[in-house]
Amino acid sequence: MMQEAAIETQGLRVRFGDFVALDNLTMQIPSGSFLAVVGPNGAGKSTFMKTLLGLVTPESGQVRVLGKPPGSTPTQIGYVPQIKTFDRSFPALAVELVLSGVRRAWPGPLRAPERKLALEALERVGAERLAERALGRLSGGELQRVYLARALVRRPELILLDEPATGIDALGEKDMYHMLEAYRKESGATIAMITHDFDVARYHASYVIVMNRTLYGCGHPSAALCEDCLSRAYGHGKHDHKRTL
Ligand SMILES: Nc1ncnc2c1ncn2[C@@H]1O[C@H](COP(=O)(O)OP(=O)(O)OP(=O)(O)O)[C@@H](O)[C@H]1O
């Protein structure tokens, strides 16, 4: 039987006013993949993820996520946003942030079964001790773990992570990839992750897309991360992926 695609796009195009952020993206990402999305700053990686979530509407083209139009299966998708812009003065506890992933709205009083779910998710990412901590008192890496717990709490079929290594130390980063990989193996879920780290894409991902508004590489890491694909996506053979525009 042919493996079903978890993410499928055909001629996807997204425009913000005069600016074309995504153009002619066509891909099929098999279910159960660990996908790494790489490309320079401003390449449209976050826009691509937001399109998969149904938060950005394409100008043209087709998109199917878990076989459905974007936004129609929110409970089957876990999302870890970029945390660097998160306002930590927001008065809430870690356990409440995790629970917002169950209810899709900010929780009121916590019911015991929901609280148990949230604590299990925190435990899964090694952060159970943070449950009662105010968000404002978490370090960047701790907040990232709490977001991961939130993404996992409904045991989703697809997890989308936007630069999840930001703010995590090297050991925490390694732990996170192992934890994601364990979850993928045990559940058969698909994981899609934006990263600026080619080694992470090469050694942790089973599938890679290299993009800069359009696709420059797509497939097995060794094929997608080829010298030519990277130099075309990053421009003039410069592979310094941390540069800012
Ligand atoms: N809502 C919006 N309105 C107008 N322009 C936008 C909007 N969202 C994104 N853009 C523009 O689209 C381009 C792609 O942005 P996006 O955040 O998707 O890039 P990225 O690849 O995730 O970048 P980075 O690696 O820096 O996080 C940028 O030039 C950005 O300014």
Image (spheres, rainbow, N blue to C red):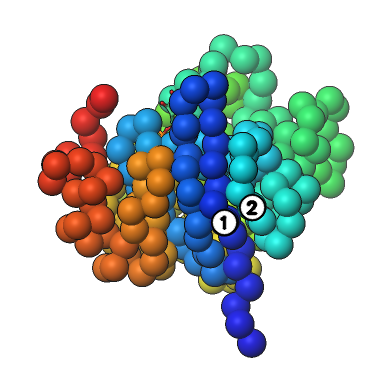
Disc 2 marks which amino acid? Gln
Q: Say how many tags the image has.
A: 2
Q: What residue do we see at 54% from left, 69% from top? A: 30
Q: Position of residue 71 (x, y in %)?
A: 73, 44
From this view, report whether residue 32 is shown above or below residue 132.
Answer: below
- Residue tagged 1: 10
Q: Position of residue 38 (x, y in %)?
A: 35, 48
Alpha carbons under labels 2 and 1: distance apart = 5 Å
Q: Nearer the viewer, residue 238 or 35?
A: 238
| Mark number, residue 170 | none
- Residue tagged 2: 62
Tell me where residue 226 sits by quadrant. bottom left
The C terminus: image quadrant: top left
Residue 55 appears left or right of 198: right
Residue 215 appears left or right of 243: right
Residue extending furthest toward the bottom: 1
Q: What residue do we see at 59% from left, 26% from top? A: 133
